[in-house]
Image (cartoon, rainbow, N blue to C red):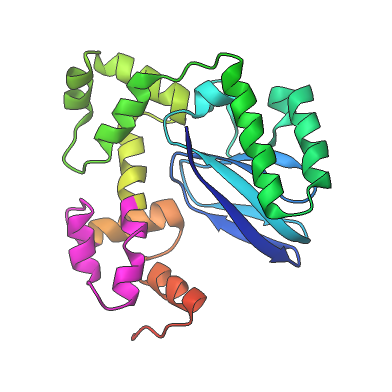
């Protein structure tokens, strides 16, 4: 259900780069509670000036069930949660505004999700299983559908409802997410871009480059250098 929670130190207002991963984040930015999602490309999410922000990430494959609407109906970017959940989201915002620490704010978000589940939210086990299978670079939509006992059309319907895109597009996003997890290895000279591209399921480094520009708006090399700057590490040209 919940993949992770996080806390960020904001300070002055700034723009945050969010890469597509098929997940949905509940984000408290000090002013409002929103669900933030992107699955088709990089998102620039503006954070207002605040001491800290907290978020709770829903697992890929459960967004539609938890949020209560098909993910295809949710616009890319930030949507105020009160537009989806009404009074319960409003009460959570009031509690978040009074939370003295990020840890307390995380507990408010966790309680909000728990209450949602207590009311009888039913997760789509087929979509969860499909996401797990599609993480494999060798998986194909037709075989995944057959393994799960549904038609390709049925698989597409389930995945689009819970994630916002079909199985083939989701697999592209999951493959790129796998690459992003290895960016640090390249920056630390523990692996090469060519090796990481192959291990992530790309045909070659050029294939990775095209997908990186499409999904992140930047080359793989630029992403490596960006990671290195954040941790204060030099990367050779």
In the foreground, 137 or 57: 57
Q: Is residue 193 magenta?
A: yes
Question: Residue 12, image x and y in percent?
Answer: 76, 67
Drawn side of residue 175 relative to residue 140, left or right: right
Q: Is residue 151 visible?
A: yes
Q: Is residue 132 above or below residue 203?
A: above
Q: Is residue 55 above or below residue 64?
A: below
In the foreground, 213 or 143: 143
Q: Is residue 140 above or below residue 186?
A: above
Question: Residue 217, image x and y in percent?
Answer: 46, 58
Q: Measuring 41% from the left and 71% from the top, which residue is drawn there? A: 222
Q: In which quarter of the view is residue 187 placed? A: bottom left
Drawn side of residue 194 relative to residue 51, left or right: left
Number of numbered callouts drawn: 0
Q: Measuring 46% from the left and 22% from the top, which residue is drawn there? A: 161
Magenta span of residues:
178-205
Q: Is residue 3 above or below residue 226?
A: above
Quarter containing the C terminus? bottom left
Question: Residue 162, image x and y in percent?
Answer: 45, 25
Q: Is residue 34 magenta?
A: no
Q: In which quarter of the view is residue 60 placed? A: top left
Q: In which quarter of the view is residue 197 placed? A: bottom left
Q: Measuring 60% from the left and 34% from the top, which residue is drawn there? A: 75
Q: Is residue 68 visible?
A: no
Question: Residue 22, image x and y in percent?
Answer: 44, 39
């Amino acid at each position: 259900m919940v993949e992770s929670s996080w806390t960020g130190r904001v300070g002055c207002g700034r723009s945050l780069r969010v890469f597509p991963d098929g997940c949905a984040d509940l984000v408290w930015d000090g002013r409002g509670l929103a669900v933030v999602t992107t699955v088709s490309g990089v998102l620039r999410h503006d954070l207002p000036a605040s001491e800290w922000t907290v978020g709770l990430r829903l697992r890929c494959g459960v967004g539609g069930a938890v949020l209560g609407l098909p993910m295809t109906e949710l616009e890319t970017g930030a949507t105020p949660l009160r537009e989806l959940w009404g009074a319960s989201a409003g009460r959570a915002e009031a509690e978040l505004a009074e939370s003295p620490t990020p840890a307390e704010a995380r507990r408010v978000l966790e309680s909000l999700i728990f209450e949602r589940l207590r009311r009888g939210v039913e997760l789509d086990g087929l979509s969860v299983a499909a996401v797990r299978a599609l993480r494999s670079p060798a998986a194909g939509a037709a075989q995944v559908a057959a393994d799960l006992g549904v038609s390709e059309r049925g698989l597409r319907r389930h995945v689009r409802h819970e994630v916002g895109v079909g199985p083939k597009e989701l697999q592209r996003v999951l493959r790129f997410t796998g690459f992003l997890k290895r960016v640090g290895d390249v920056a630390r000279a523990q692996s090469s871009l060519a090796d990481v591209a192959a291990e992530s399921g790309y045909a070659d480094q050029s294939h990775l480059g095209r997908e990186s520009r499409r999904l992140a708006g930047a080359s793989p090399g630029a992403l490596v250098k960006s990671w290195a700057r954040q941790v204060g590490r030099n990367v050779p040209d």
